Amino acid sequence: MSFYRIVFSAVVFLCFSVLCACASRKSDGNKASEKNQDKPEIEYIDGVLENDLQEPAVFKPTEPEELKYFRLAYPDVKFLAYFDEEKKDWAILVVANGKTTLLYWCDCRFLPENEVQNKNSYRKMLYKYSSAVKNPENFTEQEISEIKTFTSKENRTSSAIDPPFLYDAIYESFSRQTIERHIVKIGFLTKSMNVHDRVSEKLAAISTKIMNLPKTPELEKFFATLDRTDAYVWRSVRDTQNRSFHSLGLAVDILPKGYYQKIIYWGWERQRKPDRWFMIPLEKRWMPPAEVRQIFAEAGFIWGGTWIVWDNMHFEYRPEILLFSAEN
């Protein structure tokens, strides 16, 4: 190959390489331009990247967790909840007995609109219930002082009361006339009593289970000394503004023979020993057998013997409290 031909070939190759490099750079430049067009411009606001600024958090209220215990306790009742922006509280539509009642959550009080402003006049409807009975031998001086204050006549007549409005919706207990449409007579432990029709089958089942318990000496004595069983009575709780659960046909009193001579109810004992009634030893108080109390609890009834103001004859239907206490 001649010298000139070699030089010519080298020049052609060099020119071709330059042209390819230019084309490649142009293509990369176009791609970069396209990327820059897709990428938003970054602006700084008071030294902060605009992209780092977030939208303000939106308040999203969460339905009260405790509402689930009422839904579980009353599966045939609908609890439809929505957040009322104006009142900043949950509105609960309670659908029962073919009617819808609007109540406000009010921190577990279920109050109608006209009572929301009086929220602190009502107690919460859920509390921690324990089936254990406190032994007065272990009371501290502080506990004794608290018991005296809690059970004083001044406190019992002026303290917050139990809100009745949810129960009114469920049991139609607005008045004596409306509640008595639901009161039925049933046999119970060889006796009879009047109860709300919503719990009549539960109480009949309780009676059957108790009657079928193995007859231990304690149970034999329980049946032998049984005087009567009481349920529906339209009245208030002694010394308070609270409507008794007896008024709803949801409470049962089991009374043994000679109960006026037995230590069975704090109020009767306080009349005899106003300063020491709460120190009565457990062995001197009448109590239903543990098996009986357990059968009531399994059906949704709490026992009054565990209260500070102990009422050892008394059971009342409060399934939501038992459900709440089991998890808290």
Image: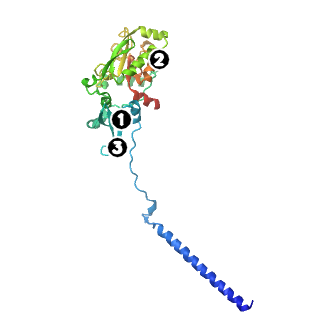
Density class for disc 2 (Cα within 10 Å; few <14, some 14-19, many ≥20) is some
Give the numbered dot on residue 291. 2
Task: Tell me: residue 254, above or below residue 34.
Answer: above
Q: Nearer the viewer, residue 2 or 101?
A: 2
Residue 50: in sight, yes or no? Answer: yes
Quick check: marks 2 and 1 in contact, CB under 8 Å?
no
Residue found 52% across the figure and 71% down from its top: 32
Residue 309: in sight, yes or no? Answer: no
Give the numbered dot on residue 320. none
Q: Nearer the viewer, residue 56 or 64?
A: 64
Q: Position of residue 313 (x, y in %)?
A: 38, 16
- Distance from Cα at disc 3 to Cα at disc 2: 44 Å
* Quadrant (top left, top right, bottom left, bottom right) of the N terminus: bottom right
Label 3: state its secondary structure: strand
Give the numbered dot on residue 83. 3
Label 1: state its secondary structure: strand
Which corner quadrant of the image does residue 173 belong to?
top left
Mark 1 — residue?
Answer: 78
Label 2: state its secondary structure: helix
In the rendered structure, the answer to whether residue 69 lies left or right of residue 182 reads right
Residue found 45% across the figure and 13% down from its top: 283
Q: Earlier in the sequence, mark 3 or mark 2?
A: 3
Task: Tell me: residue 47, above or below residue 78.
Answer: below
Q: Position of residue 256 (x, y in %)?
A: 38, 11
- Distance from Cα at disc 2 to Cα at disc 1: 34 Å
Which corner quadrant of the image does residue 310 belong to?
top left
- Tag nearer the camera, 2 or 1: 1
Residue found 36% across the figure and 36% down from its top: 79
- Tag nearer the camera, 1 or 3: 1
